[in-house]
Amino acid sequence: MKLPGQEEFEVSSACKNVPTGELDSSPGSGPRPDGPLDTKRGNLGVSKDPLLFIQLNELLGWPQALEWRETGRWVLFEEKVEVGAGRWSVPHVPTLALSSLQKLHSLLAEGLVLLDCPAQSFLELVEQVTRVESLSPELRGQLQALLLQRPQHLIQPTGTRPCQGSAHPREASYNEEALLKEQHQNPLRQKLPPGAEAAAVLAGELGFLVQPLGAFVRLRDPVVLGPLMEVPLPSRFFCLLLGPSTVGKGYHEIGRAMAVLLSDSQFQWTVRRASNLHDLLAALDAFLEEVTVLPPGLWDPTTRIAPPKCLPSQHKRLFSQLREVKGPPAPPGALAEDRHGHWLRTPSPELQRTGRLFGGLLQDVRRKASWYPSDFLDALHPQCLSAVLYIYLATVTNAIIFGGLLGEATSGAQGVLESFLGTAAAGATFCLMAGQPLTILSSTGPVLVFERLLFSFSRDYSLDYLPFRLWVGIWVATFCLALVATEASVLVRYFTRFTEEGFCALISLIFIYDAVGKMLSLTSAYPIQSPGSPAYGCFCQYPDPGGNESQWTRTEPKDRDDISSMDLGLVNASLLPPTECAQRGGHPRGPNCHTVPDIAFFSLLLFLTSFLLATALKHVKTSRFFPSVPTLPGRGWLVSPFGTNPWWLSVAAALPALLLSILIFMDQQITAVILNRAEYKLRKGAGFHLDLFCVALLMLLTSVLGLPWYVSATVISLAHMDSLRRERRTCALGEPCSFLGIREQRLTGLVVFILTGTSIFLAPVLKFIPMPVLYGIFLNMGVAAMSSTQFTKRVQLLLMPAKHQPDLLLLRHVSLSRVHLFTAIQLACLGLLWIIKSTPAAIIFPLTLLGLVGVRKALERVFSPQELLWLDELMPEKERSIPEKGLEPKYSLGGDSEHSELMYQPKTPEINISVN
């Protein structure tokens, strides 16, 4: 049965939604599919329709003075007007009464539905909506006059009081120019992306109506409805819900239900493409099928649910809807393959064998050559300046610490000066040539252990250290080139999260241990003076005009001296911001995460400046940054091939070089795997073969010059990438800023290493930087890298009672005893690595790193694939067998929820170091 006034628009209901004016380029303007659900839907992706801003205007004041007032707004979450406070509430997840959805269904089924209405103004729209047979001409005129009344909005421009703090609107609101200016000055307008559209929902009680009046309109072309909306956005939808007086908040809740429906992405996608009333009601029924009901006795409806830190994916809902679409059932094998294919790792094209010598290297060169110009142009952003400052300080600190340790280990054969020059030369060359220029080369703990062993061996057997080291470096470069030629880098596919977390935890512990050790070593030269501890000193005084005397006195230290070197480092490490989106956009305080504040890029500079001022004003005595440490007297910059060593030692050097090659390969490629994970959304691809090739050449160069050996530094490289995070500039009200990827370029690393090289000439300026501040940065990176892994979360579970454990997703699918067993094995491996590194058995340390892969392989005999899928990742052989065997649990109480939760978990970096 056709509703009155609906026949006029049936012909136009199949037309395209072609936006006009500046909306011509907006998405979602293509033709509609044949039905309410398009099975392709962008390969089951999320709709690319324009963002929809929904506003609820409520009719208040019956029967005295009727007026429209804005009481709520939605983009993704709901904001309510808090009348007493004269402000908007915090964004929250809306909750609805089931009866309001049922009443809305009845109103839409019996009301007026106009799809692709050609109205070009609010007046035309009102005339179309009120053209119903149930209204007499007199009532129609009254209703039209009422709808054309200007609503009262709660607009609060920056720095002013809200305009709806009293019952009387401002006189300026009756001025059209003032109204337009007020709409454009609304802060919300700057927080909505270009091309956004609006939807108006009008609801309320009207005493002269005998029966409910419902109307739903989808405009063919979006139209700006003048003062109806608080922001001057073109409106796509208009909904009118009026009726006689009822008990309670009947029509208010029905209006909220309509607004919540329009804010739902799946309902909105269907309604934009609906061709008749049946499609609209089918979309509402589909929404009702997914509604979760809370028992009234256990839930207070006035409680506001905070927005989640991470929004669930819409893929899961799409699959449940597509199962209801009639069609031939899919074969079980195809369904399993489609289902598992989403959460299994896709083989990277960089890790496919070509079968040719240096084939992988040539592919990396061709792939990265096309991106080379953009690697410099993409660095033209203020965020890169902040990244340069942070990574420069981290690199300098690393060069000082490891340079000092290397000087102690080699009796001055290599020291801080060589560390600075080597870091600058090797790092700058790598940034210009490497396949992944975001990688930061530096001295690492495992390589330092090998250097110490090599020097001890040379000293014990009266060998010339630098010539012997030269031949070791030559052999390492040769072995690494052989690995590049045979495409051995494809073996990194076997480096799962078990191996990555174990290696990252080891490096993080080295950072923490060295930073704390250096700060503790300063306590002897600059002792801690706590309040109340006496300080002894000698001073001279003149007791009388006849002479003088010296006295030893005990004095209480002044407050300004109660700051130690260690305090500066620990305070600096604790004040560095620990999180990214949770600090800036994840807090549900309204639409304040639309853009990353530029001042946040320079937080480290502010911290560094504050501590410089603090040490200057408080006259804190501590060690200062002074990098120009002289090298070993008498050594040249070119190492002699033999020196006093016999010729056959050049051949014997191949044996320790083989162990060092394993260490270099593991150290470099584990870091490369972590940096190039799909979660970082890198656009320009990786370069495993090219990176190893560059490291091999640099090993040869640093060996000839007698400089330290360099390899990818895991912690500093992660900090570099995290300082270049890109986030979406606009987001829904209360929605956390979404991670877009990394600002991939070569310039930040290049500038960092150039500054590191020039630091030896900037000693008069850099000497004012307190060393504890640099140690604090060093400590912060180690703690941040350690605390952000799943391994750390599982270690905390060992010491936590079951009732206090967080609701981790893995705990829903793996028993706690199995989780503890997996964690204990990882702890044992980490402890074994640390013991071997710290004992004379460190010569086999490279083999123990390689043994992590073997341990992970052996775990397949202890844990089921289902458990390993949640605790770690599956190895390539297991991934290929999944479509045939599947990973179905023995008992399933929730359909395919076991895999659907993991399948659609948001892909964010697992090991994360936040610096801004």
Image (spheres, helix red, strand yellow):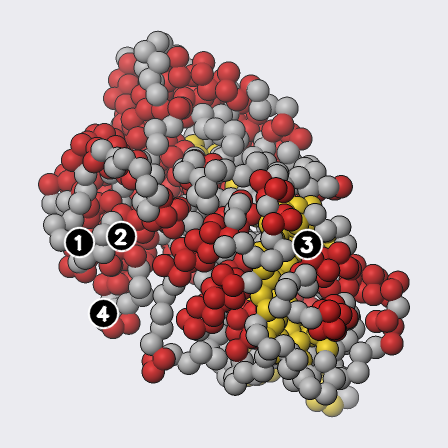
**Mark 2 and mark 1 residues within 8 Å of each other at the beta carbon:** yes
SS state under label 3? strand
Q: Position of residue 455 (x, y in %)?
A: 34, 32
Q: Is residue 282 in view from this perspective?
A: yes
**Residue at coordinates 60% horizontally, 29% vertically from top-left?**
375
The residue tagged with tag 2: helix, strand or loop? helix
Rendered image: mark on residue 802: 4
Distance from the alpha carbon under mark 4 to that under mark 3: 51 Å
Disc marking residue 892: 1
Snapshot quadrant of residue 69: bottom right
Query: Disc 2 and disc 1: Cα gap in Å?
Result: 9 Å
Amino acid at circle 3: Ser
> Tag on residue 253?
none
Task: Give the amino acid at mark 1.
Answer: Ser
The image quarter in which residue 131 lies: bottom right
Query: Which-is-in-front pick, marks 4 and 3?
Result: 3
Q: CA distance from mark 3 to mark 2?
A: 38 Å
Residue named by callout 2: 897
- Which of the marked residues, 1 or 3, is nearer the chain's N terminus? 3
List the residue tagged with mark 3.
235
SS at mark 4 in the image: helix
